[in-house]
Image: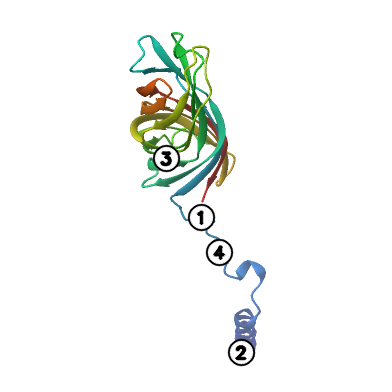
Amino acid sequence: MKSARLLLLSLLSASALAVICAPAGASDLPVKAPAYKAPAFEPWNPWMVRLRALGVVTRNSGNVDQVPGSGLSTSDSLVPELDITYFFTKNIAAELILGVTRHQVTGTGVAATNGLDVGKAWLLPPTMTLQYHFTDFGAFKPYVGAGVNYTVFFGQTAGNTANGAGVIVTNSHLQNTFAPALQIGFDYMIDNHWGFNVDVKKLWLRPSWDGTSNVGALTGKVNLDPWLIGAGVTYKY
């Protein structure tokens, strides 16, 4: 009887030792948590540039002071234009546009000025606007803006051609001037960097004008008041 109890205890001890020393099965191994991969993060950059084709559509208005009933007409222009935008926040930005345009001024109205080639001039019209960008429409990002323009006239030449009344402008000079500006437009972003842009600005630009002619000195005002209508490519850094 004693031998049987000893045998039973030996068997139980051997079984317990086998369980303790047995290699762990797959179900007994600790579960390893999957590796966490942080989402890609691209730092925000405040700079944006646009390259646009810009149509400059002027108002055909103005006058020569010495000729009652006179008028002045200014040609339109289509030019390339670059703008640089800096975002202070996601919504507030400042934009500077750069470009040059060339225009011809022609007399209208009474016979003394009708058809008169007043002259040509190049315009450098840098315009700075402060903008508010709406950010609740996904890829479509409209904005509004207001600011100031300062137009520099250079490369000015007089017409030196007689009209039907025999008047010839021999010297022509448009004076540099400031103008208020309003703006509305939108960007449609294709991805985080590239998109396309449509932009419309209105300037109230009315430079004074003076010149000389074969009938004496002349002065006046050219009411350009142009619409700046642009469309092009957006790149956001």
Q: Quadrant of the N terminus?
A: bottom right
Instruction: Look at discs 2 and 4 and give the one toward the viewer.
Output: 4
Q: Upstream in the sequence, badge 4 or badge 3? A: 4
Q: Upstream in the sequence, badge 3 or badge 2? A: 2
Q: Position of residue 46 (x, y in %)?
A: 43, 50
| Label ID, residue 33 | 4
Left or right of residue 6, residue 125 in this image: left
Q: Amino acid at mark 1?
A: Glu
Q: Position of residue 176 (x, y in %)?
A: 36, 36
Q: Upstream in the sequence, badge 4 or badge 1? A: 4
Q: Which residue is denoted by mark 3 in the rendering?
A: 126
Crowd rating for badge 4 (residues with CA inside 10 Å; few <14, some 14–19, many 20+): few
- Label 2 sits on a secondary structure element that is helix
- Label 1 sits on a secondary structure element that is loop
Q: Which residue is denoted by mark 2 in the rendering?
A: 6
Q: Please tell me in which quadrant of the rendered image residue 80 appears.
A: top right
Crowd rating for badge 3 (residues with CA inside 10 Å; few <14, some 14–19, many 20+): some
What residue appears at the point 53 percent right and 42 percent down from the top-left corner? 50
Instruction: Look at discs 4 and 3 and give the one toward the viewer.
Output: 3
| Label ID, residue 42 | 1
Crowd rating for badge 2 (residues with CA inside 10 Å; few <14, some 14–19, many 20+): few
Q: Does 154 appear above or below 118?
A: below
Instruction: Look at discs 4 and 1 and give the one toward the viewer.
Output: 1
Q: Amino acid at mark 2?
A: Leu
What whole-number distance in Å separates the C-alpha atoms at marks 2 and 4?
47 Å
Instruction: Look at discs 1 and 3 and give the one toward the viewer.
Output: 3
